[in-house]
Structures are given as structure tokens and as C-alpha cells.
Amino acid sequence: MGEDGEIKVGFFDSGVGGLSILRAFKKLCPSVPVEYLADTEHAPYGNRSAEEVLRLSENNSRELLERGCDVIVVACNTATQAAIKHLRAWREDIPFVGVEPAVKPAALYTKTGVVGVLATAGTLNGRLFNETKERFAKGVVVLAAVADEFVKEAEKLAGVSPESVCQAERERLLNVVKAKVEPLMNAGADVIVLGCTHFPLLNPLITEVCAGKAQVIDPSEAVARRIKTVVEDLQKRRIS
Ligand code: DGL
């Protein structure tokens, strides 16, 4: 809980990725107190086993609960895949909000019938992701690409916008983005889903590469709205 009994929201990720969700939430609810935990000691999560990510997610959640958080945001697609069901069963009294690749809206928006999903291996191999794909993207081709390079680059930027780096560095980053995104668009994808919370930190460059060819789906605002609803529900329950 915050100082005068307000609801406090805890966010965790392997590193800076979850800041994309935290920033969107702060825009929506600037006065709600937050805690952010970056598990840099065990980063990246993308190629760890689901069991390891589950254990790390439980440790991160425990730490955030000790810091007085009332709501936990699993601000990481990889950790959501591996751990959200377990976390909800582990602490039934705590609301957990997760992040999953936005396959459903992508399947609705696509006109070519092909969508591209950029994520970590852990996310793309996850059960939730594959169930969502089965359920909401029937008849749509979902091209999945592991983009660990984007995680590394977002970490190097450490929260700084790629728009504020020098021209040579910007060109280099743009080429890293092109190498991953262009093959998806060349294969017909007209929607690109950012399925890792690190990727919105590179979004100005991803959007530039996709301009006129594909729509980019950044889930940060939708997740922030979901957190806001969860906080408001909890506030109402405490009052009544
Ligand atoms: N930001 C995370 C995600 O959404 C994890 C990236 C990583 O640590 O590999 O998947």
C-alpha cells in the first residue's frame, strides 16, 4: 500500500522492457504510486526455460509484495507465458495483470490475412500464445520471429529514446530493425505485433520501417487501461 493507504502497483520485467507499460500507466494514472523491479541479474528471460522464468517471476512478485504492492503487473510477455497462471493460483488475494502478444486485434485488422509477431522464443513457444493463436487467428497466417536483438538494443538504450541518439547509431539501429521486420512484410504481413515489452522502446524506428506497408500494434496503452480498471475495482472493494 502507498503512504496514505492508496493502492500501490508493482511492475516487473527482466530489464527496462516493462518501462513501456509503466510509462503508459503513469500517463493514465499519474498519482497512483508504483514500484518497478528490473531483474537484470537474470536477464534476458527469452531463452530461459519456462520453469526458470516461473521461479524468477514468483521471486519478483514476492519482492514487490514485500515493498507493499497491492497489484502486480507481469510487464513481460515471456514471464506472462511462463508464470501468470501459477502466480494467480499462488496468491489468489492479489490481482496479477499480464501482457500477451496482441494476436486478436491483429487478426481483426489484417487485410492480407498475414500478421507478423515479434517476440522472444519463450513467448512464441508458450502455451497461452499458441492457444490464443488457435482461438483468435483462425484462417490468418501468423508469422512469428524471435527478435532477441531488439531486447539487447533496448537494454543498451536504457530507456533513452532511439530518436535522441547520434545519426550513425540511429542508422545502425534502423538496420537491426529492418533485418527483422522487412522479411515479415515481404512475406505479406500488413500488421506487426510487438510481442515483447522491450520492443515499444524501439517503436519510432519500427514504425518508420513499417510506414505505408504495415500497421504496428504496441499493446502498452491497452495494458495500462486494464491496470487502471483493476486498481479502480480494488479501490471500490476496499471502500465497500
Ligand atoms: N521484456 C520481456 C518480454 O516481454 C523479456 C525480454 C527478455 O528478457 O528476453 O518478453
Image (cartoon, helix red, strand yellow):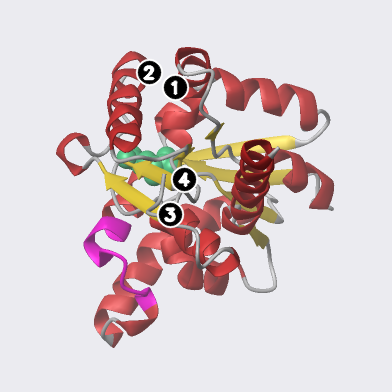
Residue where numbered disc 1 is placed? 82
Q: Are marks 4 and 2 in contact (CB under 8 Å)?
A: no
Among the two numbered marks 3 and 4 on one chain, the one whose residue lies closer to the N terminus: 3
Q: Are marks 1 and 2 in contact (CB under 8 Å)?
A: yes
- Badge 4 element: loop
Q: Position of residue 89 (x, y in %)?
A: 52, 13
Residue where numbered disc 3 is placed? 4
Q: Position of residue 219 (x, y in %)?
A: 61, 52
Among the two numbered marks 4 and 1 on one chain, the one whose residue lies closer to the N terminus: 1
- Decide if residue 186 is on the left or right side of residue 19: right
Q: Position of residue 47 (x, y in %)?
A: 31, 29
User: What span is colored magenta in the figure?
Assistant: 153-162
Q: Residues within 10 Å of mark 1 (few under 14, many from 20)?
A: many
3D distance between C-alphas at marks 4 and 2: 16 Å
Q: Which mark is residue 196?
A: 4
The answer to whether residue 147 of the structure is visible from this angle is: no
3D distance between C-alphas at marks 3 and 2: 38 Å
The three-letter code of the residue at mark 3 reads Asp
- Kindly tell me whether mark 4's CB lies below 8 Å from ligand 1: yes
3D distance between C-alphas at marks 4 and 1: 14 Å
Q: Which mark is residue 50?
A: 2
Among the two numbered marks 4 and 2 on one chain, the one whose residue lies closer to the N terminus: 2
Query: Is-magenta flag for residue 176?
Result: no
Q: Quadrant of ligand 1?
A: top left
Among the two numbered marks 3 and 2 on one chain, the one whose residue lies closer to the N terminus: 3
Quadrant location of the C terminus in the rendered image: top right
Name the chief secondary structure element in magenta: helix
Image vertical order of residue 164 relative to residue 85, above or below:
below
The three-letter code of the residue at mark 1 reads Ala
The quadrant holding residue 160 is bottom left
Quadrant location of the N terminus in the rendered image: top left
- Badge 3 element: loop
